[in-house]
Image (spheres, helix red, strand yellow):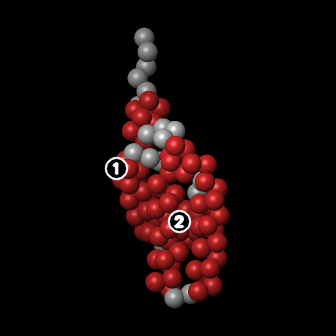
Amino acid sequence: LACYGGMVCYYNVWLLLFYLTGGVVLMILANRSVFLAVFVTVSFPVILLLTTGNWNQFLVVTIASAFLLWIHRKNFGRVKRGEEEPMRDIIRNKIFKKSEK
């Protein structure tokens, strides 16, 4: 995902900031972390094609997107089976973990 973010940043840093902001909001609303990857990988090739009209770039980014989605296939399976830890629990338990006395 970091390399994919680098591609987006190379194209447009403001788009990367939009993705990060929108992706975090989407993750919190959907309560699943995997939605950030889906949000970026599905929309970026379309945005790139619509703004540049460059089919070669679109093809390369679409292949990278398909690869990224394929890499996350286990996460999708965990979400489908209800095994993926909800995002709110991750935030509460791992990021803002209360210190025990």
Q: In the picture provided, is 67 more to the left or to the right than 78?
A: right
Counting labels gives 2
Three-letter code for the amino acid on which mark 2 is drawn: Thr
- Figure check: 83 above or below 70: above
* Residue lying furthest top: 101
Residue 14 x/y as whole percent: 42, 68
Q: In the picture provided, is 25 more to the left or to the right than 70?
A: left
Front residue (pair 34, 11) = 34
Numbered tag placed on residue 41 in the rendering: 2
Residue 37 x/y as whole percent: 52, 57
Residue 100 x/y as whole percent: 43, 15
Numbered tag placed on residue 98 in the rendering: none
Query: What whole-number distance in Å separates the C-alpha atoms at marks 2 and 1?
Result: 18 Å
Considering the image in quadrants, where does the C terminus appear?
Answer: top left
Three-letter code for the amino acid on which mark 1 is drawn: Leu
Residue that label 1 marks: 29
Identify the residue shown where x is 38% and y is 54%.
Answer: 26
Q: Secondary structure at mark 2?
A: helix
Q: Is residue 85 visible?
A: yes
